[in-house]
Image (cartoon, coloured by chain):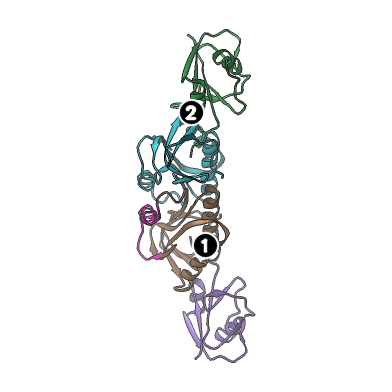
Chain colours: A purple, B green, C cyan, D brown
Amino acid sequence: MSITVRYFASLRERVGRAEDQLDADGNDTAGGIWARAVPEQAMPDRVLIAINQEYADADHPVRDGDEVAFFPPVTGG
Amino acid sequence: MSITVRYFASLRERVGRAEDQLDADGNDTAGGIWARAVPEQAMPDRVLIAINQEYADADHPVRDGDEVAFFPPVTGG
Amino acid sequence: MSVSLHPEPFDPWARLAAHQAQLPAGSFGATAVFVGTMRDFNEGDDVRGMTLEHYPGMTEKHLEGIVAEARSRWPLDDCLIAHRVGPIEPGDPIVLTAVWSAHRKAAFEACRYLMEELKHRAPFWKRETLKDGQVRWVEKNTEG
Amino acid sequence: MSVSLHPEPFDPWARLAAHQAQLPAGSFGATAVFVGTMRDFNEGDDVRGMTLEHYPGMTEKHLEGIVAEARSRWPLDDCLIAHRVGPIEPGDPIVLTAVWSAHRKAAFEACRYLMEELKHRAPFWKRETLKDGQVRWVEKNTEG
């Protein structure tokens, strides 16, 4: 198993890829996942985070097998 | 010329006719028109009044040639 | 701007499609619509049919006044009101109000305003026929 | 209850007619509808086209959650949300929300709630192509 990290919209373009696969370290949070996956960039202030397709905060724990997504403010409708 | 008095919906049934023609007396109000046209019945409390198809109060003056309408609270839509 | 009274059943969705086809495409961003439909029950009783009486002339004039007032209060591209008159059966649309605007706040607020004004002031009166054949004037409008 | 994403243009009025045909006639009295349409201008610029990105899976789940929340807050007979994804042209409908209820207050409020929640939380992102060919992500949603 591993953790799937996904990026959407302008954030995907900024990161330069749509997806990463990370090994779980047993003590991850959503914010920690960003720091490990995109070490060259600070997590943007207004980023939205979803864990397994539900909104979550940066300090929410992440477990092996989870899908963590990062994306900018939504602009649908 | 004369004043046309019209009754609608349940009020028309209560008055027993749809329309009256009255001679103007030069000093009429909407309430006065009712009293002259339907002397056998007091004007209902919740009656709505329109003069020339615009809402008006009972003390609004009525002139020769005007159309005065009396009807119950509206229930459209 | 369109205000119309319909002695025959009308299809609100077809009416909207036809009206909107006349507006310049790409000019409006928000459309808010309300449709009131006749139910087969009212105040606890089964209702078989209804007749809608109106005041020819004043009713149209009053509806046009409501539309003008809405256009003075909100920035609107267009408005539409259609209302049935005469005999109506359960399931028939009674009223359609629609508003086109650049923004959804104006569209929602103006559409609701049209309906509230229409319900409280436009000269229409409903007479219901109940399942047992009894006929009664509706005394109180449906709550907002 | 119906939530759908449309990679191709859809006709909101035909969608409403088809959906409503499935509901028991005479059961609902009030239908409130909102349609968001792509305009050919935004923030002062002429816009030639747009692409709507979404998060497959989460977007549908989130819209279903919004509908469930609305149904827990208001007494509703039915709800419908349809949303475009992919390439979109000016004049194309982007979003449709519709609510059927016994009373107009619940219908209006719930329809507006669906739109506000969708605008603020549903994972969609717009990328515009301007008239001069420049491409930009829309950063701020249209105001309510």
Q: Residue under mark 2: which chain is it in?
A: B
- Rendered position, D89 above or below C78: below
* Relative image position of residue B33 (x, y in whole percent): 57, 15
- The residue at which mark 2 appears reads as B9
Q: Does the magenta stretch include residue C134?
A: no
Q: Is residue C43 visible?
A: yes
**Position of B23 relative to A24 (above/below):** above
Residues indicated by labels 2 and 1 sit on the same polypeptide chain: no
| Residue D10 on the magenta segment | yes
Q: Which mark is residue D19?
A: none
Is residue D140 visible in the rendered image? The answer is: no
Q: How crowded is mark 2: few (under 14 residues within 10 Å), some or many (20 or more)?
A: many
Q: In this view, does C44 lie above or below D136?
A: above
On the rendered structure, is C88 left or right of C73? left
Q: Residues within 10 Å of mark 1 (few under 14, many from 20)?
A: many
Question: Would residue D65 appear left or right of D40 to someone viewing this image?
Answer: right
Q: Mark 1 points at which residue?
A: D118
Residue C44 vs residue D46, the one in the foreground:
C44
Label 2 vs label 1, nearer the camera: 2
> Whole-percent x and y of residue C70?
53, 39
Q: Measuring 36% from the left and 40% from the top, which residue is drawn there?
A: C9
In the rendered image, residue B39, in percent from the top left (x then y), is placed at: 58, 14
Give the residue type at disc 1: Leu
Image coordinates of residue D135 in percent, x first then y, are 44, 65
Which one is in front, D46 or C46?
C46
The answer to whether B43 is drawn above or below residue A33 in the figure is: above
For the residue labelled by badge 1, is the local secondary structure a helix, a strand or a loop?
A: helix
Q: What stretch is highlighted in magenta?
A: D5-24
Label 2, label 1: how far apart the Cα atoms are? 45 Å
Q: What element carries label 2?
A: helix
Residue type at the position of mark 2: Ala
User: Which chain is mark 1 on?
Assistant: D
